[in-house]
Amino acid sequence: MIQDIFPHVFHNEFQIKTPGMDSYFLYFQDGRLLLDHRTSKRIPQFEDIKSQGKEAMSCSDYLFSIDQMDFFLIDETAVTLTETDSLTFYETGIIRDLKPMWVSFAAISAGQLHRFYSSNRFCGCCGSPMMKSKKERSMVCSSCGNTVYPKIAPAVIVAVTYNGKLLLTKYAGREYTRYALVAGYTEFGETLEETVNREVMEEVGLRVKNIRYYKNQPWGFSDSILVGYWAELNGSPQVRLDETELSTAVWMAPEDIPDDFTNLSLTHEMILLFKNGKVS
């Protein structure tokens, strides 16, 4: 999955650091990400913007490290970067396709923190400006002291099986058109297993039993932690589709499942496990 970057090691401990010219930077602007396109698309370094390097470095926040490589976020409200002969803006959807996978993981993680900083510039309690904490990864109100941490929303992914088949779904009204699994966010006061039962009932009108935890995955695209479960059908297999959420839901045998899945997501890993006969 996208976070499985071995032998590289991801270090997300909060630190205050000053970037060097060989440090990497992420620069987001209007839903786009600035990347170096000279060979394969890669995350640029400060040495790639020498004319604005010092200004950009002074307006950057340390995000994390991968091995000995430091990654910083340039504040787009303080510094304006433009395209050059080597740097081009790309829609952030390209992040899924960056190679090798540790580069993609770095970009998705940076995107999550960028959303956190940019959406918490003002206090939700009193409206005063928020300041970046000097001791932890948080935003602190300059007036009332309200403290906000990066949003991480728990969500479940549910692989429902019945009579040697897997329930596959497609989202309604989204650009993403591949098959997926039943999924949804945990509500307040719910256990994860209660979320499994509720989401399956709401989206496809089915009851499940023998709910079994599989694995979890940080999913920075939606500021989530995804928690995967296997479950067996309990009762009628007749689907009652919630068409506001899904466009289709079908029971599919392993040999009928398409081959167009990647190793990036928990959803795809679970579908492939079933397709390859490793889960019944």
Image (cartoon, rainbow, N blue to C red):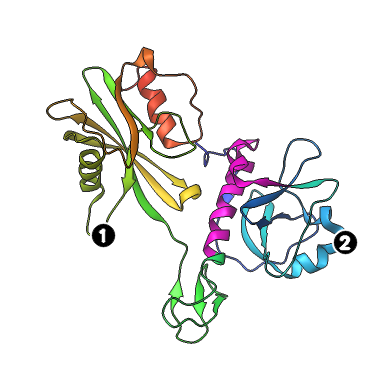
Q: CA distance from mark 1 to mark 2?
A: 49 Å
Q: Nearer the viewer, residue 178 or 99?
A: 178
Residue 168 in view, yes or no: yes
Return the disc, 1 or 2, that comes first in the chain's sequence: 2
- Name the residue located 54 percent from the left edge and 60 percent from the top edge: 115
- Name the residue located 33 percent from the left edge and 29 percent from the top edge: 248
Mark carried by residue 79: none
Badge count? 2
Residue 268 x/y as whole percent: 43, 30
The local secondary structure at tag 2 comes to helix
Residue 164 x/y as whole percent: 25, 17
Q: Nearer the viewer, residue 79 or 203?
A: 203
Look at the image and tell me in which quarter the C terminus lies: top left
Mark carried by residue 188: 1
- Name the residue located 31 percent from the left edge and 22 percent from the top edge: 279
The residue tagged 2 is 51
Residue 131 x/y as whole percent: 56, 77
Q: Which residues are magenta?
A: 89-116
Q: Could you tell me the amino acid type at mark 2?
A: Ser
Q: Could you tell me the amino acid type at mark 1?
A: Phe
Above or below 204: residue 54: below
Mark 2 burial class by Cα count in 10 Å: few <14, some 14-19, many 20+:
few
